[in-house]
Image (tube, rainbow, N blue to C red):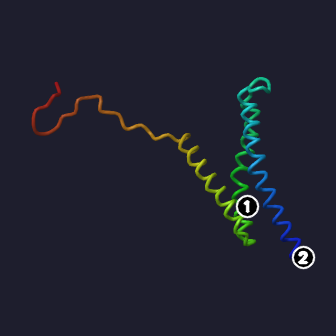
Amino acid sequence: MGESRRVAVSALLTIGAFVWLGVVPLMFVNGALRAYDIGLGPGNPAAASSTFTWASWLGAGIPVVGVVVAVTTRRRGWARFYGVGVVVVAVVAAFRWAETHPVPPPPPEPTRCVEHSGGDSDCP
């Protein structure tokens, strides 16, 4: 029973790595081709939206699940591999968040004359 479990976990981790490194990038490329009219007919961002959504969920979820499975089954190599994947996903997510949440502009300068106590005033 223990040997079959070990083989199943190894197969799961290997398939997860293949999907994360191979299939997810292809899904992003497919979505870009659909959205931006690069050889697949007229561009349709709405049709590509589901592809991008699935690719994003798989791209973020597979490394997290991989780390959990690798750590609970005490596989250090896989834990490092998927841990690096989690770091990559976190960096990409941070940059994406920064792009979509710009820093608010500074408050505008006063547009009317403001009197200050002491000294001369430039106000009319």
Residue at the image point whose x is 50% and y is 40% from the top: 102
Q: Which residue is mark 2?
A: 1
Q: Quadrant of residue 39?
A: top right
The C terminus lies in which quarter of the figure? Answer: top left
In space, the residues marked 1 and 2 are separated at their CA atoms by 22 Å
Q: Residues within 10 Å of mark 1 (few under 14, many from 20)?
A: many
Residue 16, percent across and down?
78, 56
Q: Please identify the residue farthest to the front as the structure is shown.
A: 77
Q: Is residue 1 rendered to the left or right of residue 9?
A: right
Q: On residue 2, which mark appears?
A: none
Front-most of residues 23 and 58: 23
Residue 62, percent across and down?
73, 55
Up-down: is 99 above or below 124?
below
For marks 1 and 2, the one nearer the N-term is 2
Up-down: is 17 above or below 28?
below
Q: Please identify the residue farthest to the bottom as the structure is shown.
A: 2
Looking at the rendered structure, the secondary structure element under dot 1 is helix
Residue at the image point whose x is 53% and y is 42% from the top: 101
Q: Quadrant of residue 84?
A: bottom right
Residue at the image point whose x is 71% and y is 50% from the top: 59
The N terminus lies in which quarter of the figure? Answer: bottom right
Q: Quadrant of residue 46?
A: top right
At label 1, the amino acid type is Gly
Residue 38, percent across and down?
74, 27
Q: Residues within 10 Å of mark 2 (few under 14, many from 20)?
A: few
Q: How many marks?
A: 2
Front-most of residues 2 and 65: 2
Q: Which residue is mark 1?
A: 66
